[in-house]
Structures are given as structure tokens and as C-alpha cells.
Image (cartoon, grey):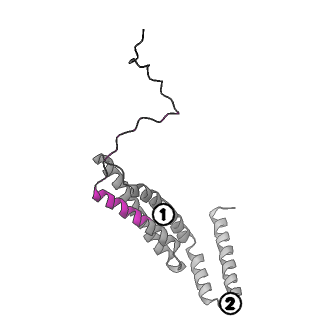
Amino acid sequence: MARLTDRPPPPPESPFLRPAPRPQLPPADPAVRQRAWAGLTLAVLSLLTMMLMNNIQRGAYVVSVALAVALVAVALAVSAMSAAKRAGTRRPRAAVLGTVLGVLGAVLSAFALAAFLIFHTQLDHYANCMNGALTNTEQQACQTQLNNSIGTEINVLGGT
């Protein structure tokens, strides 16, 4: 006969039940958190540089700097995450976001740099044309000339 103090066996594991909570890891060291924040700051700076670029003649240089800053941001953020893992502490929150934004900035910068290098002569002609354009009609003519020359370049490179 079963006693009142006897307990029934525990139910089998269910995918609908929450797993048992894991113990909380201690927070990361301040130096690791600062490294993660530095990576996030540089990643945001790289993206802002790409968005606020307004001089086509210096575009390749600005994009090159943005690419370098994004790569440094990714390196800082990834090193902060690995240092936290080695120390057995929590991953800094800024490290994940810094990695994501840094990779995004690096990819955008790499594509923009490739475009600046491929279409360098067309962009120089466009910048010179826009510097001499005084009316909206002349500016539209410069835009049409750029579109036609880039379309021709894409066809030469093997596009359709």
C-alpha cells in the first residue's frame, strides 16, 4: 500500500515545459566590456561614415577608411566575446551588436569600394559634370550621362 509521503515518478521531459534554469554567470570584466563598447562604437561610426558620404571625388578614400574601421570593430567585438568565454563570464551585450553592425559595415563598405574602383572614370566624369552644371536641366543631363556610361560598363563586364 502506498504511503502519503510517497511521490509519483516525475513526468517525462516535455518539449512544452521550460527547462530547468541554468545558474547565472558572473558579469564580464570591465576591460572586456569596454572592448565590446569600443567595437560597437566603431561599427556605428563605420555605418555613419557610409551614410554621410557626400563627396564622390573622395568616395573611394572615405569608403576605404570605413572598411578599415568596420574590420577593427569586428575584431574588437569578437575578441571581447572570446575573452568573456575564456574567463567563464557572461558575454557583454555590446559585443554581439558590435559584431553584427561591424560585419554589416564591412560588407557595405566592401561593395561600395568595389563600385568606386570599377566605375572610377564614370564617377569622375559625373563629378566634373555636376560641378559645371548650373541648372536642373544640366544636372539631369549629367545624371543621364552617368546612367548610360555605367550601363555600358556593366555590359562590357559581362552583364546583360
**Residue 127 versus residue 122: which sits nearer the camera?**
127
Query: Residue drawn at (64%, 66%), measured in percent from left and top?
Result: 154
Residue 38 is covered by the magenta coloring: yes
Query: Residue drawn at (54%, 78%), measured in percent from left and top?
Result: 56
Residue 70 in which image quadrant: bottom left
Q: Residues within 10 Å of mark 2 (few under 14, many from 20)?
A: few
**Residue 143 versus residue 145: which sits nearer the camera?**
143
Tell me the residue that label 2 is attached to: 135
Query: Residue drawn at (40%, 66%), measured in percent from left and top?
Result: 41
* Dot placed on the residue nearer the N-terminal end, 1 or 2: 1
> Please, what secondary structure does the residue beneath circle 1 have?
helix
Which image quarter holds the C terminus?
bottom right
Tell me the residue that label 1 is attached to: 105
* Residue 14 point in image, percent of width and height: 50, 29
Q: Is residue 59 above or below residue 12?
A: below
> Please, what secondary structure does the residue beneath circle 2 have?
loop
* Residue 156 point in image, percent of width and height: 65, 66
* Residue 39 point in image, percent of width and height: 38, 62
Is 34 left, or right, of 51 in this rendering? Answer: left
**In 3D space, how far apart are the residues under numbered discs 1 and 2 (Cα atoms)?**
35 Å
Is 76 left, or right, of 44 in this rendering? Answer: left
Q: Which residues are magenta?
A: 16-43
Q: Is residue 77 above or below residue 10?
A: below
Farthest-out residue, top: 1
Is 159 left, or right, of 96 in this rendering? Answer: right
**Residue 29 versus residue 141: which sits nearer the camera?**
29
